[in-house]
Amino acid sequence: MDFTLSAEAEDVTGRMWDFMRERVLPAEPVYEQWRAARGHDDHAHPPVLEELKAEARRRGLWNLFHHELGGLTNLEYASVAEITGWSPVIAPEVINCGAPDTGNMETLMLFGTPEQKARWLDPLLEGEIRSGFAMTEPDVASSDARNIQTSIVRDGDEYVVNGRKWWTTGAADERCQVFIVMGKTDPDGPAHRQQSMVLVPRDTPGLEIVRHLPVFGYQDQHGHSELRFTDVRVPATNLLAGEGDGFMIAQARLGPGRIHHCMRAIGMAERALALMVERARSRVAFGRPLAEQGTVRESIARSRIEIDQARLYVLQTADLIDRHGAKGARTEIAAIKVAAPQVACDVIDRAIQLHGGAGVSGDTVLARFYASARTLRIVDGPDAVHIRSVAREELARERPWPG
């Protein structure tokens, strides 16, 4: 299995690293200072992001997440996603490769009508607006999509939406202009044909943004919000694909998206390891540098081993998706969603431990990284659901000898 990048992908990753070193990483304190001055409960758009977006476009680093747009395979884009993980708050957005927009753009590319694409996909591809994906609900275990309670009822030429959603990423930012909403159009139908998805514009009457939820005390700029839909009416033409296709659409959008999530997690782990190494070299305790302490060396070595193992697993999965599609890699997609965030959590935790009080403060990126990596073990399906899927496949696997 050869994971060597093509000449084109090598060029893109090289330019991405130049962009990170020259513009993105130096912009982090500018971004944080601007938000701190306004208060972190303010979800306004930091101007530095628009400056970086213009620079990314100038450098040809735009919409790289999809092979039809950026010319990269899933395997090749995985390396770009890892680089953006070094600055996960800023880098994905400024190259127009941030979640949930990438998944929503892919969904519209796959299932949108020409009219839906013209109204929503084109401005998303241009970075003019953002979008949300409203699936998770507060009153049911939404990791099982069959539990979704939001109703989508046909009424003449319209659909009427009623229900509650939360953890809808992006809704706090006024640039978020449309939501893909999952609900039930046929609650009495077959279990995986009850759900449908509709496009709901932000300004639709009856759509209320109730609150913005913090993540381990952090209020992200784009927000993670609770929404209430009360007799929300949208044209029947806002349906994505057909009635009953919601579960199928949800599965289709998750394959490549999980590669992106996992590789960004690996990028965070790599930055945490870099900080760990720098701390070990520069800090002295008990008469010698931390780098000479056995337990510190073990933490560094274990981190390198685990990061490389996780990266290889994710790259293998990306290669399988390229060759066989998401269905042909469903077990691996589930497995990496468990493995990569866990590795990131473990490496970041070691880095925090090595930094002592500084590690849990805002003086480094480590505390925010840990909050993000730990949350990743829940979003897009919790660990337990993916472990269940892997176990089911393993139990059904035929073996050359029973053991």
Image (spheres, rainbow, N blue to C red):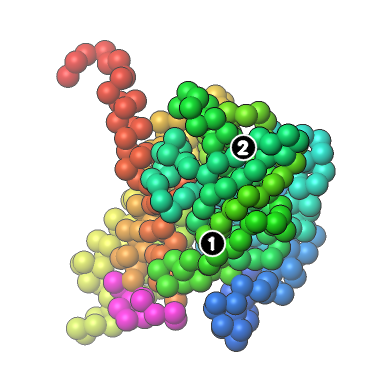
Left or right: where does residue 341 sit relative to residue 195? left
Bounds of the magenta span? 353-363
Q: Position of residue 154 (x, y in %)?
A: 66, 35
| Residue carrying label 2 | 153
* Residue at 30 percent of width and 78 percent of height: 356
Q: Position of residue 392 (x, y in %)?
A: 31, 27
Q: Secondary structure at mark 2?
A: strand
Residue 68 position by quadrant? top right
Q: Secondary structure at mark 1?
A: strand
With respect to residue 245, does 70 lie above or below? below
With respect to residue 127, does 241 lie above or below? above
Q: Position of residue 401 (x, y in %)?
A: 21, 13
| Residue carrying label 1 | 225
Q: Position of residue 320 (x, y in %)?
A: 51, 29
Q: Amino acid at mark 2?
A: Val
Q: Looking at this view, is 58 or 230 the one in front? A: 230
Labels 2 and 1: the sequence-earlier one: 2
Left or right: where does residue 199 sit relative to residue 403? right
Q: Looking at this view, is 294 or 229 the one in front? A: 229
